[in-house]
Image: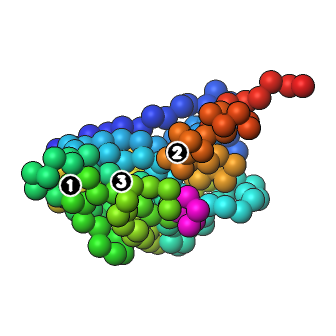
Amino acid sequence: MTLTLGAVLVAGAAGCGAGQVAGTAEQVTSSPGTVGEVGQVQVRDMQFVWSDPVVGDEVYAVGADVPLQVTIINEDDAGLGGADRLVAVSSPIATSGLVVGDATLSDGQQLVAGYDGPVSSISREGAREVDIVLEGLTAPIRAGLTYPVVLTFAEAGELALQVGVENPAVLPPRAYEPEDDPAVLGTGPGPGVVPDDE
C-alpha cells in the first residue's frame, strides 16, 4: 500500500535555476519539514539536513550523500504487538539509500534521525536514534525545491513524500514542549508566529 502526502506549498514566483531543475522537483515556500502517515506509522519534520549558508541555490551537488532529518512514530501503543521496522529509504534522485542502526518501531516507539542533541533529546522516552542517508545523488538538490523520497516499512508498506531542505532558522515544531513554548511562557512568539513591528 502506498500513500503520498506532500503538504507542499507551491511558490508563485519562478526560482533560481529555472530550466535546470530535475523533473522530479517541486518549488516550495520555506516551511518546517514534511509530514505523512501510512498505517500506524506517522512521519514528522522530514527534510534534508543543512545548517550552513546557501551560496547560490545548490545545496548538494551530484554525487553527494545526503542525510535526512525526521521523526518517525509508531502510534500503536496498545501493547498488541503492532511493531514495525523501517527497512529502506530511496529516491529517484539518488543511487541508493542507507538506514544505519536499529530501526525497529515497537508499540509507541519513536525513531529520530539527523537532529542535533538539544532537539533530538526532546522526544518520547526511549526514542531510538538512527541515521538515514541518500547516497550518490544523480541530480543536485537546490534550496526552495522539494524532491521525492520513499520510506519503506516492513508492515505498513511504502510512504512517498516530497522533501525539502532544512531551514536552520525554523525550529522543528516537535522540539517545543507546551511548557517550553515561548508563546506559553510569554517570552516571545510561538513557532511560525511573526511578531508585530514595533
Principal secondary structure, stretch drawn in magenta: helix
Residue at image coords 75%, 59%: 53
Residue at image coords 39%, 70%: 130
Q: Choose top left, top right, bottom left or bottom right for residue 38.
A: top left
Distance from disc 3 to disc 2, alpha carbons, whole Å, reads 17 Å
Q: Residue 72: give its label.
A: 3
Q: Is residue 17 visible?
A: no
Q: Is 57 on the left or on the right of 2, as rendered?
A: right
**Residue 69, position in %: x, y?**
49, 59
| Three-letter amino acid code of the residue under disc 1 | Asp
**Residue 91, position in %: x, y?**
38, 58
**Which stretch is magenta?**
115-119
Q: Residue 177: give its label.
A: 2
Residue at image coords 25%, 60%: 105
Q: Which residue bears the numbered disc 1?
A: 107
Residue nearest the observer in this picture, 168 or 148: 168
| Three-letter amino acid code of the residue under disc 3 | Ile
* Sequence-wise first label, 1 or 3: 3
Going by the picture, which residue comes out furthest to the bottom? 101
Q: Is 177 on the left or on the right of 107, as rendered?
A: right
Distance from disc 1 to disc 3, alpha carbons, whole Å, reads 12 Å
